[in-house]
Image (spheres, helix red, strand yellow):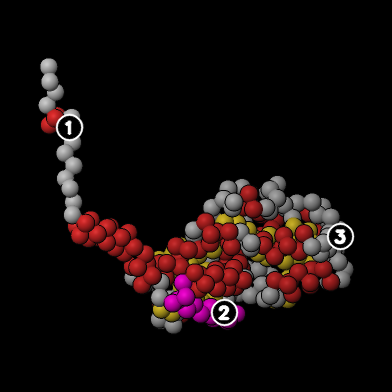
Amino acid sequence: MAVSPFVRSSVSVPIVPSVMRTALALCLLVAAISPQLALAQEVSGSLAIAGNGPEFPVIEKLARTFEKAHPRAYLDVIWENNSKPVDMVKAGQAQIAVTGSEDPDLQGAQIAWDGIVVMVNMSNHTKEVTTQQVAEIFSGKVQLWSDLGGPDTKVLIIDRPRNGNVRDTFERQIGVTGKIASGKVLGPDEKAIKTVVGTLPPQSAVTFISMGPALEAVASGVAVRLLPVDKVEPEKPTVKDGRYKLRRPVLLLSKKTADPLVRAFTAFATSPDGQKIVDEWYTPLLESK
């Protein structure tokens, strides 16, 4: 039986003229690059990021890396110890506030966790403390380290600035808001660390500090110790999973109708590339690879 030449294939392939093929290819090319063109338009303009805490190094590096990837974007990092970043965003003086607490009038994006550690001199042989004991130390109820199994010296509190993100969270978490006993107030982390090292007698001084610079000091051989709290060591894994309770979120706050540049920078800070930068100072939300 002869086979008809018209049933060799079940699919009919039309012959497309060369002009039509060229037009179709151009349409597909435009469709492919249009999202990239739109993105390029979104990440242009200027953006002010305000803060007053220890986050400056990580925010500065995130901002400069973002600018390199997006040459049409300009990011100004405004960092002053006595500034009020949240109020600056509300007043339109900045578009992003870096803080550790949410605000009901603004939207927040978390980019990291920051542990808050209790730091003493290396020669202070106090083994560990509970959250309650931390509260009693910094509220002035415990005045001798020997009451906690440590040396027979007085407790000397090295306080931190009242407007800093670390202090606010620390007070709330140990339940001593507005009750930290008076002591020498030191803003920069380096000064607080040096004071703990250099205070005489060396077993007396204690402070609370962001975990990043504290771990760096320990790794560099500075004569300080970080006290375990509730039998948990302050480390990135214990901060990330919440076993170490003294921690705070690092947040980017912006208006709820944030512009595209704010959204683009926030997306970068929470992306794998941004989280690699975050990991240099804080505990990232994403696993570092």
Name the amino acid type tagged 3: Ser
> Which span is picked out in magenta?
70-85
Residue 190: say if magenta. Answer: no
Q: Which residue is mark 1?
A: 10
At a point 30% along the width and 60% down the height, the residue shown is 29
Per the image, label 2 sits on a secondary structure element best described as strand
Badge 1 or badge 2: first in the primary sequence: 1
- For disc 2, the neighbor class at 10 Å (few under 14, some 14 to 19, many from 20) is some
Q: Which residue is mark 2?
A: 79
**From this viewpoint, is residue 3 visible?**
yes
Query: Considering the image in quadrants, where does the N terminus appear?
Result: top left
Q: Which residue is mark 3?
A: 123
Name the amino acid type tagged 1: Ser
At a point 42% along the width and 67% down the height, the residue shown is 264
Per the image, label 3 sits on a secondary structure element best described as loop
Per the image, label 1 sits on a secondary structure element best described as loop
Name the amino acid type tagged 2: Trp
Is there CB contact under 8 Å for labels 1 and 2?
no
- For disc 3, the neighbor class at 10 Å (few under 14, some 14 to 19, many from 20) is some
At a point 73% along the width and 62% down the height, the residue shown is 216
In the rendered view, tell whether residue 274 sits above or below residue 261: above
Mark 1 or 2: in front is: 1
- In the visual, does 4 lie left or right of 194? left
Q: Which mark is residue 106?
A: none
Residue 197, quarter of picture: bottom right
